[in-house]
Image (spheres, grey):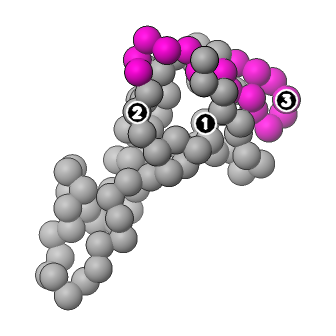
Amino acid sequence: MINLQQDAEGFIRMNRHFPESILVSVTFSDGSVEEVSGKRLNQAYDEALAEFRAQNHLDAKGFSRYQKSRTNPGNKVDFVRIQPGIGD
């Protein structure tokens, strides 16, 4: 089982997808513990990635459509915001 700890700002460190069938134990900043499926965390990761790409003007695959003179800020997220009750 994978154990994750939520930080004070409400994020967990997640820089990749987990297997969908795995259960992940998440300890929230308020002390509560919840088991969440890998599938549900993957959905939260995909939502955070889509929001990141939209804010940075990247297309759906993460490519910048600006001229080459601009730098690409990256194409992934390392932290995902979650809240208690995510597994419901």
Q: Residue 17 carries which label?
A: 2
The mark nearer the N terminus, 1 or 3, is: 3
| Disc 3: which residue | 31
> Is 34 left, or right, of 68 in this rendering?
right
Q: Which mark is residue 82?
A: 1
For mark 3, does the 10 Å Cα neighbourhood hold few (<14), some (14 to 19), or many (20 or more) residues? few
**Residue kind at label 2, given as amino acid type:** His
**Residue kind at label 3, given as amino acid type:** Gly
Q: Give the range drawn in magenta.
A: 19-34
- Residue displayed at 46% across by 45% down: 15
The mark nearer the N terminus, 2 or 1, is: 2
For mark 1, give the secondary structure.
loop
Q: Is residue 56 above or below residue 53?
A: below
Mark toward the viewer: 2 or 1:
2
Residue 24 falls inside the magenta stretch:
yes
Taking depth in this image into account, of 3 and 57 the one nearest to the observer is 3
- Residue displayed at 43% across by 11% down: 21
The answer to whether residue 51 is visible is: no
